[in-house]
Structure formats: C-alpha cells, structure tokens
Image: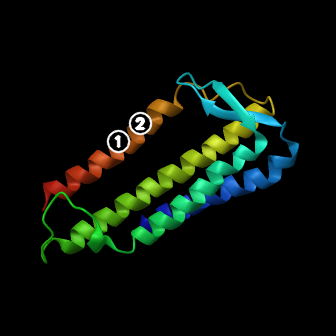
Amino acid sequence: MDYAMEILAALGLLTMLVLCVLHYGQLPEQIPTHFGPDGRADAFGSKSTLWILPGLGTLMFVVMTFINRRPDRFNYTVKITPENAERQYSMATRFIRAMKTLVMLLFAFLVWYTIGIAQNQTEGLGFWPLPFLLIATLGTTFFYIFRSVARK
C-alpha cells in the first residue's frame, strides 16, 4: 500500500509537469487562476501562473517525503512507548503518504481543468470537487486519528 501511494503521488506530480510542458505554448495569455464554490472560474491571470501548482506540488512532494523519514519527530495524539512506537510510526508515515497522494492528485486535476477551461474545452470544475476534497482530506485525517487512539 505504501509503495502504491508513493507511485500514485509521483504520477500525480509527473502529470502536472507534463501537462504544463505540453500545453503551455497553446494557452491564451489569460487563464483561470481561481474557482468559486460552483466550480466556475472567477479570477484570471497570466498563463505563467499555471506553473504555480507544479512548483508548489514539487516543493510539497519533497518536503513531505523528507518529513516522512523521521516519524520519531512527529506530534502524536498518544504517548509513544516502546510497545506502540512501531505501530504509531507506521500509521503516521502512511497518513503522510495518503495526504501527499491526495494533494498531488488534486493539483494534477486542477492543472488539467485549468488547461481545459483556458482552451474552451470545458466550462468549469463542476460542483463535486469541493465536497470530494473535504470528504477525502477530513476522512483520511479522522481515520488515522481514530486508528492511532483506538489501539495505543
């Protein structure tokens, strides 16, 4: 599962970068830079802003990968003991991987839709990305908190 999440996160990052490289030259000078709750673009900016998500995604990928190598330095909801350390560390690193994967896939989705909207291939994100994002991130967070506290 850990390998699958790492591969999926890396594919999300790679997808962002490839999409930007392949489509940048074809984009109009103004592209969507913000989306309202209804999924429609409500702010526009220079096409160079398309590189913000891959840049931020790359930074987050590297930082989350680096942080994940030191689970002994994380904050935990339970006291770490020799008996529970391995389990707690394993769950914490899996949580970071899950969040990294969600962020990379979300960013790739946003880059893809931004390009599609800028090229008049679609009108907006639609309604479902915001509830999905909230459910996925909060659900993942609560799941891992519950599991870490349930069996100390």
Tell me the kind of residue under disc 1.
Leu
The disc at residue 28 is none
Tell me the kind of residue under disc 2.
Leu
For the point 23% across and 74% down, the residue is 86
For the point 47% across and 68% down, the residue is 65
Give the side of residue 150 with respect to residue 110, left or right.
Answer: left
| Secondary element at tag 2 | helix
Residue 149 picture location, percent across and down:
16, 55
Q: Residue furthest bottom?
A: 82
Residue 125 picture location, percent across and down:
62, 30
> Depth check: 124 or 33 in front?
33
For the point 80% across and 28% down, the residue is 120
**Residue highlighted by disc 2:** 134
**Residue highlighted by disc 1:** 138
Q: Is residue 2 above or below residue 102?
A: below
Give the side of residue 90 with respect to residue 39, left or right.
Answer: left
Residue 82 picture location, percent across and down:
13, 78
Residue 90 picture location, percent across and down:
30, 69
- For disc 1, the neighbor class at 10 Å (few under 14, some 14 to 19, many from 20) is few
To which quarter of the image does residue 92 belong?
bottom left
Q: Residue furthest top?
A: 38
The N terminus is located in which quarter?
Answer: bottom left
The C terminus is located in which quarter?
Answer: bottom left
Q: Is residue 12 visible?
A: no
Give the side of residue 124 with respect to residue 1, left or right.
Answer: right
Dot 2 and dot 1 residues touching (CB under 8 Å): yes
Q: CA distance from mark 2 to mark 1?
A: 6 Å
For the point 78% across and 30% down, the residue is 121
- For disc 2, the neighbor class at 10 Å (few under 14, some 14 to 19, many from 20) is few
Q: How is the image coloured?
A: rainbow
> Depth check: 35 or 16 in front?
35
Q: Is residue 49 visible?
A: yes
